[in-house]
Image (cartoon, grey):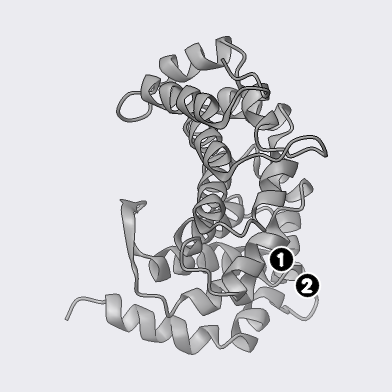
Amino acid sequence: MLDETKEEKALKDACVGLCHLFGDGIQNDRIQAILDANVVPKLVALLRPTRARAVPISVQSAALQVLGNVACGDDRQTQVVIDSDALPCLRALLASADRSIRKEVCWIVSNITESSHQVQDVLDADILPPLLKLLDNQDAACREDATWVLFNLSSNREPKQIRYLAEKNGVRALCNLLTCSKELDVLWKGCRTVAAVALKGLRNILICGQNEAASDPLGYNRMAALVAEAHGVERIEALTAQMSPR
């Protein structure tokens, strides 16, 4: 069904057919049925061009939609996507010239990082730098999902992961997002706007910084300093004022 030698239309139609099998909402039993058919490695192969074969954007997009639905499953099901070597392909596709491809990839990464157990896999695949570059370039198509990725990376409050996020300028990116009043496509975790998601992420980072400062002889909170350097303090104050009931 997903033979790479097939024509573009046949491959795209096969992926669209798989998407229809998911039904409405997240149904882990349907995701498992697709995993049992062992199609994930074949879908990942469709993302990867070779010297002999270029992959049409329409096929990449359709394959990404199936993988994104699989990544909505439980940790064990999402792990199949990771074990099929999808992360290097996703990293490469963040540089795609097609905005819909970049958006699909950010959505999948946000789904994967929903699991605290799989955040490190994403960091090890070096996906954060190109994702932050999209935010630096103000890529509107990717902004919402990329912000969720940063929030998810901060949610563990794991010092090593937070320090890595800070080293890659993730704190600055979140501070810049505090001015984005765009409403979310899907309201989630009590957030209505991109800025609200960024604020939650910064809270996690600041709490982590506060915990580390408690063991520092001088009580230095490096994360708080980074937020201040990125003009985060005044932006947080302005945002909290806007969100407060009047």
Q: On residue 216, which mark appears? A: 2
**Residue drawn at x 67%, y 83% as measured from the top left:** 225
Examine the rendering and report whether any part of residue 188 can be seen: yes
Query: Callout 2: 10 Å neighbours few (<14), some, many (20+)?
Result: few
Image point (61%, 53%), residue name? 153
Q: Along the horizontal axis of the image, is 50 left or right of 115?
A: right
What kind of element bears circle 1?
Answer: helix
Residue at 33% x, 23% y is 23
Q: Amino acid at mark 2?
A: Asp
**Disc 1 residue type?**
Glu
Instruction: Say which quadrant the N terminus sits in.
Output: top right
Q: Which residue is mark 1?
A: 212
> Secondary structure beneath disc 2?
loop
Q: Are marks 2 and 1 in contact (CB under 8 Å)?
A: yes
Q: Is residue 191 visible?
A: no
Percent from the top left, x then y, of residue 70? 51, 28
Question: In the picture provided, is 142 more to the left or to the right than 90?
Answer: left
Residue 29 occupies quadrant: top left
Residue 188's place in the image compared with 44, above or below, is below
Which residue is most to the front?
A: 7
Q: Position of residue 166 (x, y in %)?
A: 70, 69
> In the rendering, which numbered label is found on residue 164?
none
Residue 44 position, x and y percent, is: 66, 31
Work out whether residue 135 or residue 79 is closer to the camera in this orientation and state it: 135
Disc 2 to disc 1, how far (Cα)? Answer: 7 Å
Which of 171/134 is in front?
134
Q: Quadrant for the C terminus, please.
A: bottom left
